[in-house]
Amino acid sequence: MRNNNKYQLLWVLIIFIGLASCSKDFLELDPRGTELETNFYKNEEQIFQGLVAAYDVLQWGGTNGWTMKIGLLNAASDDTYAGGSDASDQPSWVAYDNFTLDPFLGPQSGFWNKNYAGIYRANLVLEKAAEVEGLSDEFVARTSAEAKFLRAYFYFDQVRFFGNIPLIDRVLSGDELYTQTQTSSSEIYALIEKDLTEAIATFELPETLPADELGRVTKGAARALLGKVILFQNDESRMAEVATIFEEVINSGIYSLEPNFGDIFKADNEFGRESVFEIQHSSASRGGWESFGNGTEGLYDVQFFGMRDYVGPNFAVGWSFCPVTEKLATLLKFDPRFEHTIIDGNKLRLQGATYTEGFQNTNYFIRKYAGLKDEVALDGEPALNWGTNVREIRFADVLLMAAEAHARAGNASTARTYLNQVRKRVSIQPITSASGDALLNAIYRERQFELATEGHRFFDLVRTGRAEMELADQGFVAGIHEVLPIPQSEIDITEGALDQNPGY
């Protein structure tokens, strides 16, 4: 059984697979087939292709089924329900929505395999860049810095999703594949911080990018991710340190808020002034169902979020996943961001539009990543080829994280300044005197409104200890559901080398 199943194990995915990338970005991978590692990585061009392959994992949404981070985290939070056609449409999404997860049911296999595939590819680039002779110092430095950022990014997702996990910081031999044991989350965080700190300190990692390199990592992205990583660990003694890191991003002069909130997610505003780190997608890969499993460059969330059987103006047909909760719609109803965050289905119906009500329908749908008719891919399967970029870290997020760090460090005035910058953009009255818990609650509420349906809410609730209070009606149990179960297939194939997370 072990030999029959060994190629299902995540870190056996270590043959370099070059997935074709898109024409709109720097991620153009050539050769487009596969090459054995022993015959590749002999020069700068080939090692750069390895780096491209590591970036490519950022785009994956079809690992072990539909495993899209934004949609699934929305469903786990109180921003949206799972949705779909009915309760049996995507059982793993429903399980995360109502916390009926178990070692066999849930999105855990997809996240586990995706992140370790990215970690492997980053490790491979780091090793080859260090081993191959004749490479320029500048190439090695920048390539290694980017690979460290990517490894940190994938580990940050993995540790948040699973807690104690195997720490793999090099390419493993075949004999080592089944002997990996879990490392404490504190050790994982230490590696993440080390990688990001070293990337930031690399002179060759740029602050800004030319047009033909948009999508690559910058110092600002690395600083923002480092601050977020430390903030998530919730160590009050480090809040001043976190605030300083975010100040470097804020004071760089590179980023600013979009004047119009509604412009942030427009297709013609990709890599706008507010984008600190953006994950690229493309409608040009022409992929069909035969290449569903991470074989296209599209953002699958867009298809999931659209209204089922929709007939009407502007929007394209979707599959009615992640209907917005009545709770969020009510909270945002009189906020200027409502119309740019939520599609009001009832209002569309009054205009003559029709759609089929899906599972858990509320008649409220996600607007930020909504598919538009004029953005449907012209070639391939439209559902798999949405070219919408993910605004992974934007400047408003940085401002609000900086506000939180300053508030927790005792700098209420500075915290209010950053909070009010976000509020001013949408013409909301400033907060002038709040401090302590009242100020923190105001910041948390602003994050809920500003970043709604972008996939941040669940982890925000977990890291601030509010998940049980806000998600109890969904079945969330503290001490269990902060993390996913370890995939049972991984425990079985390692013959018990991995321990299941408590409660599962």
Image (spheres, rainbow, N blue to C red):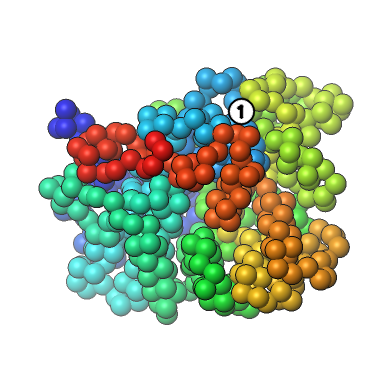
Give amino acid for label 1: Gly
* Residue at (82% x, 43% y) in the render: 333
374 vs 441, nearest the viewer: 441
Seen in the picture, residue 383 relative to 375 is either above or below; the reply is above
- 440 displayed left or right of 377: right
- 202 displayed left or right of 179: right
Q: Quadrant of the C terminus?
A: top left
496 vs 373, nearest the viewer: 496
Q: Position of residue 166 (x, y in %)?
A: 29, 52
The quarter holding residue 1 reads top left
Q: Position of residue 35 (x, y in %)?
A: 23, 47
Q: Position of residue 374 (x, y in %)?
A: 68, 38
Residue 298 appears anywhere in the view: no
Name the residue that disc number 1 marks: 83
Q: Position of residue 313 (x, y in %)?
A: 78, 31
Seen in the picture, residue 365 relative to 461 is either above or below; the reply is above
* Residue at (64% x, 40% y) in the render: 78
Q: How many marks?
A: 1
* Residue at (16% x, 50% y) in the render: 176
Seen in the picture, residue 262 relative to 435 is either above or below; the reply is above
* Residue at (52% x, 39% y) in the render: 477
Query: Which residue is situated farthest in the left direction here?
Result: 175
- 374 displayed left or right of 119: right
Seen in the picture, residue 45 relative to 366 is either above or below; the reply is below
64 vs 437, nearest the viewer: 437
